[in-house]
Image: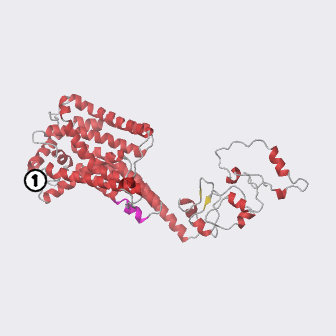
Amino acid sequence: MLAWWMLLPTLLAMMVALVLPGFMWLRAGGRSSLVAIGAAPAFTFGLVTALSVAYPALDIEWEPSTALPVLGLSAIGGAAAWALSFFHRSNGGFSLRGVPLREAIGVRVPIGGAQAAVRASTWGAILVGFLVAAWPLLTGADPANPVQQWDPTFHQNGVHAILYGKDASPFGGLHELYGGRSVYYPTGWHAFVALFARYDSVVQTANVSSLALMAVWVIGLAALVSVLTASRSALLAAPVIGGMLLNMPADALTMYNQWPNSTGTALVPGLAAAAIVVGRRFTTDLRAGDGVRAFMRRIPQAVFLLIGALGLVGAHPSAAFSILALLIAPLLASLASFALRATSAMDEASSPPSRGVPSRSASSRHPSSRCRRRRSRRWVPTGATAATGARPSPTHSCPTRPSRARRAAPTGPSFSCCSLLRASPRPRACTRSGVGPTPSSAPPNRPDSRRKRTKTRGPRPRPTRKRRCPCRAGRSSPT
């Protein structure tokens, strides 16, 4: 156990290199730190894969002094993008409007006690899941001993080949293991481990990478569950159950140490969570009618996902098929939904609605063009309803029968039952079943029959959750 504690700085350095370069970029366009941390390692492996292919063409050797600065610049650029994004959201734009910078940015509202408890419990469950996954390796293995399997031996020799040859390209970087032939082999894991290993510490660094991948695995599972469900029980159970699985991480990172395949598998949940979040926001923008602006708004996040997908391919190509199999069903469902909406919109555009009756798509489908009931109990006609002057559909209309004053009232930007009844010279009482009696309809010999009937009525029942006419709450006897 003491030998593992001596390698703790290496583990921390790996986690920093895995998280920081991508976390800042995704955090600039998102609000969830858990999803950003879960998806950031895929972004880092994407950068490592791109650099490992570009460096041999530029005659640059693969060393920590040439690769780690690029990762650091990526983290700095992401931090700047995050700061600018936060300033734009807080200030309503990039202009200071003559006020100091600190005042323009404002003070971030601290999270409440409930939110702090939720975050603490989530990360506590992640820590438990990591310890469950790493405990067999920490207690039953010496980090200086190589795993006695054929696959780990090959990959450790691949790290040695990169350290000696200074070439981490997947197109020939491991040529020494193939008799000098340049063949394709995914070298994402080998290139990453070579940044933290020396000639005499390849075995220890490779074993420490197993711990780093276990942490990436449980964090990615927690991030994926957090975007799939709002259940707190599921979110707390996901990392713990993920750490107890036999195939991954017990078999893949403890017994056989299939590092490239395990790396690709560990990166899938976090990147899938980020893809789901981006897809939902993009769908929301399209349904809101943003059009081209929706595409432009999601370009930075789409670039992040593409680099993350490159990281999956660079780690192990099978991971790309895994995330495709995971996301193909919701992707096809979204495309089918958009196709149906587009077809329905084209059909309704080709056949205009009847006079005075708004179309279904114009009145009830789109949130910006249908009649909506506000908290102030007012009807707000927008879109086609305001343009044509038509009344709301029966499913959205007031349960009262339209009176003569309402039919004669001019069409304005907004109207309500109460305002129109007040505009009438002799307002009528609105009841649940229809229009009640008025003083004009009372018998001649009993002019105050309505007032007497109101006095003899018992106390009003307490309001229920059923929708009631907005005029009933503010009804008063006529003066």
Kindly identify the residue that appears in the image at 65 percent across and 63 percent down. 391
Residue 65 image point, x, y percent: 14, 50
Query: Above or below — where is 441 with respect to 153?
Result: below
Kindly identify the residue that appears in the image at 25 percent across and 46 percent down. 18
Q: Amino acid at mark 1?
A: Arg
Q: Quadrant of the N terminus?
A: top left
- Residue 274 falls left or right of residue 229: left
Q: Nearer the viewer, residue 409 or 345?
A: 409
Residue 26 image point, x, y percent: 33, 52
Residue 165 image point, x, y percent: 9, 50
Q: Is residue 278 visible?
A: no
- Residue 157 falls left or right of residue 385: left
Stretch of the chain drawn in magenta: 291-299
Tally the numbered discs.
1
Magenta-drawn stretch contains 292: yes
Q: Nearer the viewer, residue 82 or 175?
A: 82
Magenta-drawn stretch contains 317: no
- Residue 284 falls left or right of residue 73: right
The residue singled out by tag 1 in the image is 181
Give the SS element for disc 1: loop
Quadrant in the picture for residue 294: bottom left
